[in-house]
Image (cartoon, helix red, strand yellow):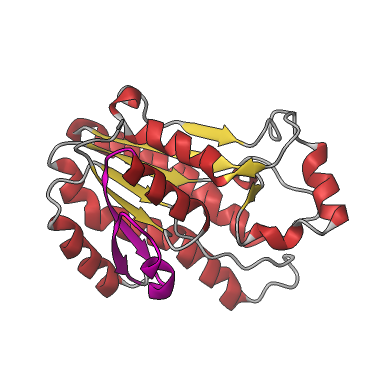
Amino acid sequence: MRLKGKTAVVTGAGRGIGRKIALMMSGQGAQVLAVDINPDALASLKGCDTFAADLTSEADVAKLASKAAKMGPLHILVNAAAVVVFGWVDELPFADWRKTLAAELDSVFLVTRAMWPLLKAEGGSIINFSSANAHVALDGLPAIAHTAGKGAVLSMTRQLAMEGGPHGIRANTIAPGFTVTEETEQHLNNPEMMASVKSKLMIDRLGQTEDIGYLAIFLGSDESGFITGSDYRIDGGATAW
């Protein structure tokens, strides 16, 4: 019960990493408000309060903040929501570029800004997501928009750590490598791509959502009380060489 007595908002909780974090934080004693754009995905999430919202909409985010305020002070904010459109730089439509940046960057800004007063009440931990792609290019992956968005989140989180320091607000990023989720399972039968992914791993297995969940629990807990402005690569060593 490492998060007993804490409240948490977890975005992108309908699937993948966000869903696993919401469930694991609830299992560690936190009162969790799980957020996703897909209400059907939230309906099957057990042990959490839920709220459906488009996090690129200021109006929806304002409603989310009102819902979160009913929990009292906010101790943990996990910005895991993301939508990404892959495409090579000479092929990616501008609309898909903007869609990706809105989902990966604007949503983090809007939600964090809305939750800031709740985090200031008692101090708290913001957990954002950069990516292995914020540090290195991955051969064969047309991720020009994704790398731009995650690189921006990495930089923005350092600024949030500075601005939050006087209020007891910490801000850190998690940078996952290839992690098996509903979204990435489609690539498991792509021999060329998987060979490229596995060639960079120092650990002989793929990342799992619970790997990310354990790190998120640590960053949300009092155990990490002196950690802020940091980025945690959790990628089986892929970006270390």
**Residue 141 in magenta?**
no
Question: Which region shows up in magenta?
Answer: 28-53
Q: Residue 213 at x, y = what percent? A: 47, 41
Residue drawn 72% across the image and 65% down it: 89
**Image: 156 above or below 222:** below
State how many labels appear: 0
Q: Which quadrant of the view contains residue 59?
A: bottom left
Residue drawn 20% across the image and 44% down it: 119
In the image, taking residue 67 as reference, residue 149 lies left or right, namely: right
**Image: 122 above or below 106:** above
The front one of 151 and 204 is 204
Q: Residue 148 at x, y = what percent? A: 58, 55
Q: Which quadrant of the view contains residue 75?
A: top left
Residue drawn 20% across the image and 31% down it: 166
Residue drawn 42% across the image and 58% down it: 13
**Image: 25 above or below 45:** above
Q: Residue 129 at x, y = what percent? A: 48, 47
Q: Give the quadrant of the C terminus.
A: top right
**Residue 29 in magenta?**
yes
In the image, taking residue 163 as reference, residue 154 lies left or right, namely: right
Q: Give the quadrant of the N terminus.
A: top left
In the image, taking residue 210 as reference, residue 116 lies left or right, namely: left
Q: Residue 170 at x, y = what percent? A: 31, 34
In the image, taking residue 1 as reference, residue 172 lies left or right, namely: right
The front one of 122 and 154 is 122
